[in-house]
């Protein structure tokens, strides 16, 4: 009897410790296929930006960083880069100044305002940028406010682009912390409305604000239609500069595309990293 039990144990032992066989997972295949489709153009563009010469062969003949050095040494690119940063930062600052109080009031004192804002944030998706640009050209090309061709028309226009992302992220953050209860508790402790907002509410929605800023910035850096139609070469941004340089060397434009992509990717990674650290600190506390 014991010999048969040992035989059964020896027979079942290796099978229980054996590694499971590989199984075909269609979900991994789909994810891998989508990732390949998305990454392949970037890989090819990066290869062309690093290629000294790429002729009829499958691989480049040589690798060099000369196109990136030439790009960053170009004063026109440097000026376009600074202009894009200034316009994006100005639009984000205007968005925070206008959207933060509106979202706060919609979650505390005027609940109906949230319904109006939910309808308003759909307008940028309903009206195409080309249609909006034509209307803005007719309105601000002359008259008392000739803003066409200046960055002052881009900042409020970019505000309409980031409005849905900024408001939804901030409103969700305010709703998740029960801002009305926090304000009531701050008043009971003797804090005024402004003091309670800046010292109690704003630190609690910092993660949502950061996510909204980085997400909106990634959209503004890649915006082309408004910048090209409203200002063009009179205030050349990065996307307008890229469009104007399409007739130049393909290696040079590839280096420009990779630079824009890397810049946006780094900012997005920093935002996600900062948000993850803040969430970990909040959960730990």
Image (spheres, rainbow, N blue to C red):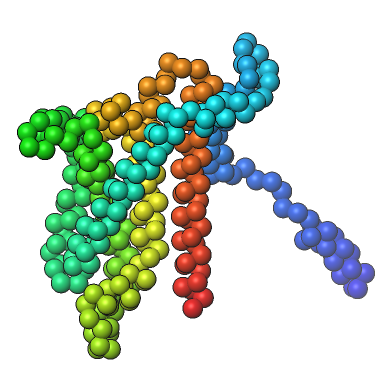
Q: Residue furthest front?
A: 75
Q: Residue at x 46, y 36 (%)?
A: 260
Of all residues shown, which one is farthest toward the bottom?
189
Q: Position of residue 269 (x, y in %)?
A: 50, 51
135 left or right of 279 in image? left
Q: Who is closer to the viewer here, 111 or 244? A: 244
**In the rendered view, does 81 fall on the left or right side of 37?**
left
Residue at 21% x, 57% y: name it: 98
Q: Give the x, y percent position of residue 60.
A: 65, 19
Name the residue furthest top: 56
Towards the viewer: 19 or 123 = 123
The residue drawn where x is 62% and y is 22% is 51
Residue 166's place in the image compared with 186, above or below, is above
Decide if residue 255 is in sight here.
no
**Nearer to us in this view, 39 or 75:** 75
Q: Name the residue nearer the viewer: 72 or 254.
A: 72
Q: Is residue 148 above or below residue 54?
A: below
* Residue 34: % across, % down: 51, 37
Q: Residue at x 23, y 75 (%)?
A: 194
Q: Position of residue 35 (x, y in %)?
A: 53, 38
Q: Quadrant of the N terminus?
A: bottom right
Q: In which quadrant of the rendered view does residue 227 lie?
A: top left
In-image side of 254 versus 189 (left or right)? right
Q: Quadrant of residue 107?
A: bottom left
Can residue 204 be seen here? The reply is yes
221 vs 14, left or right, is left
């Amino acid at each position: 009897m014991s010999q048969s039990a040992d035989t059964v144990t020896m027979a079942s032992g290796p099978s229980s410790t054996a590694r499971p066989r590989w199984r075909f997972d269609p979900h991994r295949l789909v994810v891998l296929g989508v990732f390949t489709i998305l990454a392949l153009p970037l890989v090819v563009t990066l290869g062309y930006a690093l290629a000294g010469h790429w002729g009829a062969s499958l691989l480049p003949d040589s690798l060099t960083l000369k196109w990136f050095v030439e790009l960053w040494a170009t004063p026109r690119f440097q000026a376009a880069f600074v202009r894009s940063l200034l316009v994006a930062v100005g639009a984000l600052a205007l968005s925070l100044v206008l959207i933060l109080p509106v979202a706060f009031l919609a979650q505390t004192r005027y609940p109906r305002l949230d319904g109006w804002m939910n309808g308003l944030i759909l307008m940028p998706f309903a009206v195409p940028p080309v249609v909006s640009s034509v209307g803005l050209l007719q309105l601000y090309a002359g008259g008392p406010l000739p803003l066409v061709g200046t960055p002052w028309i881009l900042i409020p226009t970019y505000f309409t682009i980031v409005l849905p992302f900024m408001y939804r992220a901030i409103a969700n953050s305010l709703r998740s912390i029960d801002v009305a209860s926090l304000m009531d508790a701050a008043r009971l402790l003797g804090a005024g409305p402004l003091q309670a907002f800046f010292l109690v509410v704003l630190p609690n929605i910092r993660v949502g604000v950061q996510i909204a800023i980085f997400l909106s910035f990634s959209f503004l850096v890649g915006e082309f239609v408004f910048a090209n139609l409203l200002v063009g070469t009179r205030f050349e941004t990065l996307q307008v500069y890229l469009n104007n340089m399409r007739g130049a060397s393909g290696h040079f434009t590839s280096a420009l595309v990779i630079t824009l992509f890397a810049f946006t990717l780094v900012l997005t990674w920093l935002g996600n990293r900062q948000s993850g650290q803040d969430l970990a600190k909040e959960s730990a506390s």
